[in-house]
Image (cartoon, helix red, strand yellow):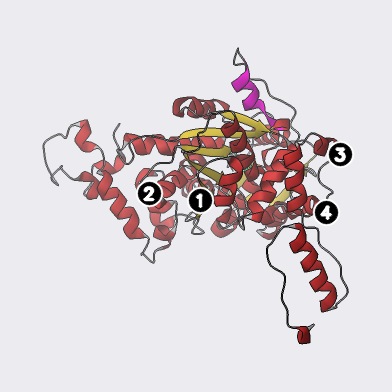
Amino acid sequence: MIYPWSEGAGPWNAGVPAGSAAKPSPEVRLPNPGGMRHLWQERKTSTMAVDQSGVWRFRELLPIVRDVERVVTLREGNTPLYEMPRSAELAGVDWLLAKHQGMNPSGSFKDTGMTAALSVAVERGFRWVACASTGNTSAAMAAYAARAGLRCIVFIPDGKIAWGKLSQAMDYSALTVQLKTDFDGCLKLLTKLVQQFPIYLLNSVNPYRLEGQKTPAMELVEQMEWQVPEHLVVPGGNLGNSSALGKGFLEMKHLGLIQRVPKISVIQAEGANPLYRWFTDENRETKPVKAETRATAIRIGNPASWKKASRVIEETGGWCEQVSEQEIALAKAEIGAEGVGCEPASAVTLAGLKKLVAAGRVTREERVVLVLTGHTLKDPQYTIDYHRGELLTAAEIAGATEGERVCHEALRKPPMVLEADEAVVLKVMEAHMAKTNVVGALTVPESSV
Ligand code: F0G
């Protein structure tokens, strides 16, 4: 493979004298891994927008625009990698981290792909961009289109997306269309529309989206001092994210930046599980499903990147799992109780990890990273309904194990309305401590009560 940047001067060309007439062998033409790591690290201290972006900082692996200084960026990427000791204990592993992609500018991992694809749209002179979305793609696209001054139209399934996301599209001034169909129906209509009108399509079928979305793989190993985790757990909807991350790791291995790739496992909601069905089907038939789940971001029955994601799972030795609505709700509350929080679709990762550990597919010693894809404020209604006890049906709760029911009970914190009286408040706090087994009484000087 010849990399476009391997011709010029730079740290990646060590071993090839500048202006050398000798034709370098393919090995020599590969970038120098040490040089690239150093360059990417150096850019963190730069004041240039393109260097401050956690996507374009890795631009040697993104040769997709001619003029990198004109890219559309909101300083995406640069997301935190959190230690998750309590979730680790719940899942049965010693070492668990969460790469929180919900800490991107528009609150989801979509920003890393959008900066890349929208920059290409601008360079190619498009005036309109469009996407079909379960909410996050539309929020990201609307933000980046607004920055670039492009017209933008989003198609979202009527009544089936979280309000936080819908409000973002409007806030960023997109033409927001709620179609009376599901996500798959929205994508179908858009595919026909782009054949009749010069619109740049920004769904994850757009290859540049995946180029941007591969960069969190680089950022992750950089944050781990170039060590590679054993396992990466990713939610699966349209399957662009798992495909992109897989590509990122495989490219890094090819370039000698890492020596091996992590196993990549994809988790789907039981009601939107076409990949899981394919994975567990002897004949490996691809059959779309009618999707239904409260994790609306992954309510997709006919994923576009089906083949790419299945290849990533197989090539890396990962697995595909499905989780129930009750398991998703519990995992989301557990991630929230750790002070991290995420939207429901992201919580499938912890729920799925528990199952992978129980089935012996992940061992206790493996270093696991959950990819949390969206911010907890994307779907506050889900969280409020859960804590008020209005989310899960009686049948869903009946399907939980005794242990899970106890956890739900301990995690639920419904809001209370109390008299404005400190004695009343203290009584509630003491009752809470007794219930949650906190040792030691709440000692308040008599005079202050
Ligand atoms: N998590 C969140 C928060 C998402 O918004 C999505 C997809 C996924 C996971 C699944 O990622 O599709 O790459 O497998 N949301 C898309 C959207 C479909 O329109 O916002 P995927």
Q: Which is closer to the viewer, label 4 or label 1? A: 4
Residue nearest the viewer, comparing 347 with 70: 347
Instruction: Name the residue that disc number 4 marks.
Output: 388
Decide which of tag 1 and tag 2 comes sooner along the chain.
Answer: 2
The mark lying in front, picked from 3 and 1, is: 3
Q: Which residues are magenta?
A: 272-281
Rendered view: 367 above or below 380: above
Is residue 97 shown left or right of residue 45? right
State the residue in front, 194 or 319: 319
Q: Which residue is mark 1?
A: 115
Residue where numbered disc 2 is placed: 59
Point out which mark residue 394 bears: 3
Label 3 residue near ligand 1, CB within 8 Å: no
Q: Earlier in the sequence, mark 3 or mark 1?
A: 1
- Between the C-alphas of marks 3 and 2, the distance is 51 Å
* Location of ligand 1 given as a quarter of the image: top right
| Amino acid at dot 3 | Ala
Distance in Å between CA atoms under marks 4 and 1: 38 Å
Q: Position of residue 322 (x, y in %)?
A: 66, 31
Cα distance in 3D space between marks 2 and 4: 46 Å
Q: Which type of secondary structure does the marked residue at label 1 adopt?
A: helix
